[in-house]
Amino acid sequence: MEVQATAESVSPTQQAGAQRRIVIYDTTLRDGAQAEGLSFAAADKLKIARRLDELGVHYVEGGYPGSNPKDQEFFRLAQDIDWKNITITAFGSTRHKSTSVENDPGVKALIGTGTRAVCIVGKAWDHHVSAVLDTTLENNLAMISETIAYLKRHGLEVFFDAEHFFDGYRASPEYAMAALRAAQEAGADCLVLCDTNGGSVPNDVRSVTRRVVAEFDVPIGIHAHNDADLATANTLTAVESGASHVQGTVNGVGERCGNANLCTVIPNLQLKLGHSAIKSDQLQHLSDVARFVSEIANMALNPFMPYVGHSAFAHKAGYHADGMAKSQIAYQHIDPALVGNEMRVLISELSGRSSVLSRAERLGLRLSRQSEDLHGLVEEIKDLEQRGFQFEGAEASFELLIKRRQPNYTPPFSLLDFLVLVETRGGRSILSEATVKIQVGDEVQHTAAEGNGPVNALDTAMRKALVSAYPQLERVRLMDYKVRVLDESSATRAGVRVMIESTNGHSEWSTVGSSTNIIEASYSALADSLEYAILVTDR
Amino acid sequence: MEVQATAESVSPTQQAGAQRRIVIYDTTLRDGAQAEGLSFAAADKLKIARRLDELGVHYVEGGYPGSNPKDQEFFRLAQDIDWKNITITAFGSTRHKSTSVENDPGVKALIGTGTRAVCIVGKAWDHHVSAVLDTTLENNLAMISETIAYLKRHGLEVFFDAEHFFDGYRASPEYAMAALRAAQEAGADCLVLCDTNGGSVPNDVRSVTRRVVAEFDVPIGIHAHNDADLATANTLTAVESGASHVQGTVNGVGERCGNANLCTVIPNLQLKLGHSAIKSDQLQHLSDVARFVSEIANMALNPFMPYVGHSAFAHKAGYHADGMAKSQIAYQHIDPALVGNEMRVLISELSGRSSVLSRAERLGLRLSRQSEDLHGLVEEIKDLEQRGFQFEGAEASFELLIKRRQPNYTPPFSLLDFLVLVETRGGRSILSEATVKIQVGDEVQHTAAEGNGPVNALDTAMRKALVSAYPQLERVRLMDYKVRVLDESSATRAGVRVMIESTNGHSEWSTVGSSTNIIEASYSALADSLEYAILVTDR
């Protein structure tokens, strides 16, 4: 692996301004999934891995197969994909204290994933070995050594996550170093110093990392948590102290206060410290990836998040915005385009013309930059976005917006009325029913259906009304239905955004609807999905 | 790396362990109010100032009277209060480039506030002086000098915010230092180095702050912004480099990505670096203050915020929670009680008996490990989790589960029937209506309400039915409403989980509901929330 080899050749006492190649190891899907309220289905994980592959990070840790059998599904699916940039990695721990490594079910599960890289966590804090693991200090070293040696014999690239390394070093530097030595001697390809409790400060990280870099011959990594609001700083400090491998998660998701945030670490490494990790055209996807992962995770992206947040380059009216007009560099630390974000002056929003244009291009739709039509489209999108729509990840709805503006476009159907009813009476089980009146050409279809919830009833009734005119809808299936509450603090008065993914067996498409009324939002996304289904099967 | 190389060997002030007294200067009400979506009424500002006074910070910057006439109202109200700890401070800028300081309306407004301390912002970046201010470098120095000297003659304590100091220093160290010198010579009591664009990294902050501390005789301050996710680290670095005055905001609110977050800076200064700022019993109010300010600001407190967030000390089941039970210090960087927060062991399907038990204990509910009751409770939780409930983060629903199993428990109300209806006809706008029949004691309440969506209509109808029997429900407000689609690939037939967070102004609680029917899931979470509200106000 040439990336690691370059890192290896860097002198132990990093020179000022020395630009180095930094390996990015993403653990959104494993450690990130420990965040409260977060859980990813295997299909979600695959979608995120694809985006990370495009972003150009180097390793994607997919899960912990020994602890979570569901993760095996992800590894099975990931094997069939031809990844451009990433190496899929499986996470596991050292063998059980009283099981031989050959018979350890966790180690077996790791090998069973078929990945060519694995990451092994082992204990580096003597207190943990005795108080939590309840074994001897010697046995813990043997567990590290035997597990890594065994996996190396299987031809795998092996990372060693030294759990609680900084706390362990404070308690017993000798033991913490002995744990690393055991890993190195067993053949580990990289020793990762973990600030598992997230409470270390940069001064500690600096002195400890320097010593480790000076005393070991393999690349050194850093895995920081954000419990003291210092995960980014600790990661940069470790890199400046000679580490060349960085672990983190998209948007900093993770247990408690989260992991080091790759969305701020990567631009800092590249734009502030001059190191290289991903290509500059890949870096321009950063804001998109941040948004995408927050959508999949169903967690609103913190608007104030550095670099990628919606407000990160937003300037309020007043003396700053005035200054902005006079000098672009006056109030921005970087050009937001470098990370795919944009400047917003909050009094008068600048047009998203070029992003609409490039999105249209990506869909193979031709729009001219000067056209009246583009102007109108941008205005319409802005208006819809104001109302909670979001076309990132809802390409079919976006394509329909463009199609509907074409003068010769006739919508395949139009909704006249609907009624949705949910009730329970006298202790009977709950009933959901929908009636719809839909016009197709000159015909009006008026029908009704039950469902196991109001949205399902509406979905069923709409299909029933349309299928005689459009028999191709028989094959259409909704694959995914997501609800996202916008402005959650408005509670039940808040707007909701519904995202639907559909398939007809050949292709897949995504649509969006938004309203303060979940039924209306769902109707809007369903109607787009069915309209798109009719169009794609027509061409 | 020059700067790093000297890190351990420089001046005595920077040595680890040198405990110093750090002055905390809060600018939540002025610079914090620049956050997108944030605006404080004068009464809000007063409430926040009172909490900051209790917290024991030293200065509270109340506003910018020269730029915002509304701020004068706050200063007028603040004059009548007998503050225990804080000095109210007014913010302003140097005199206009072509007005004498005596006639400058902004300077007049400052003096008119009646505060005994003021903070003056002036330019320290040559580029800004010519490109934004459009005046000569000499005149800018005169503006700094004359403004400060004038305010000193009025007997005020004067802080000087050197705007863009770090960017200015990079462009022209001589000019940046000249701006500070002008301020010091005019009598400024403190020179505050501002990273206005928030793009500086700790190495820059360290070397620049050290030089300034060495060359000037007055206290040096730091004012950091978070655009590179480094505001906390930059603030700590400046303090370690000799700064003794720290500016920041509660929860890090502020323009773009926000200001340095006092909720993470203060505990880091005290608990990690050993400096003193506020008393340890005051520090225990930190989480309360964070929550209070987020309430007033109407911005949900980021649950993942270090130290004060709801998830900051939350541990998921699995090997961590297992470790937690064995060793408290194993997975927490500090005792959460030090900052008024608490540890939470999240209930989830992975956790069995012992986590249910410890959860119950934390809620002050007694369950014996051997009891039949504990067995039944664990079984009930498992069954509900199978149906999509999740008690992680829904403590109130969890507590109700236990309460309802007690033989003497009488539910405060029970639902007999409900009907929810959503319709649109003949192009009219969508209508949502709910009817509910609820029994309270011997009375049956049958009523109806509209809403801007079906869940809001149901919520409104339920409160309407209950409020005559339980007037305390008037004060209950839903803060947060989240919908999560489970098994999204089942599309509109999928189960949904609804999580609701509520408050009565004193405490907050979370409830959960789950069903394939979103209305039923919402009803279940709403009913738990209202039942819990009645119970907590009863005790």
Image: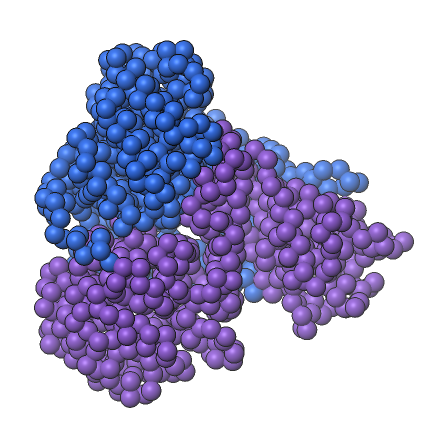
Chain colours: A purple, B blue
Seen in the picture, residue A133 relative to A411 is either above or below; the reply is below
Q: Is residue B83 above or below residue A77?
A: above
On-image quarter of the N terminus of chain A: bottom left
Image quadrant occupied by the C terminus of chain A: bottom right
Of residues B441 and A89, which is closer to you in this image? Answer: A89
In the picture shown, does residue A402 fall above or below A141?
Answer: above
Note whether residue B345 is visible: no
**Depth check: B298 or A395 in front?**
A395
Q: Quadrant of residue A238?
A: bottom left
Residue A492 placement (x, y as % from top left): 53, 40
A395 and A133: which one is in front?
A395
At 17% from the left and 61% from the top, the residue drawn is A208
Q: Position of residue A146 (x, y in %)?
A: 21, 83
x 59%, y 55%: residue:
A392
Q: Residue at x 29, y 48 (%)?
A: B204
Total numbered labels:
0
Q: Is residue A377 left or right of residue A59?
A: right
Can you tell which quarter of the image residue A345 is in?
Answer: top right
Between residue B520 and residue B488, name the one nearer to us: B488
Q: Is residue B506 above or below residue B206?
A: above
Measured as percent of width and height from the top left, residue B112 is found at 36, 11
Q: Is residue B158 visible?
A: yes
Instruction: Give the image location of residue B95, x and y in percent.
Output: 39, 19
Q: Residue at x 77, y 52 (%)?
A: A404
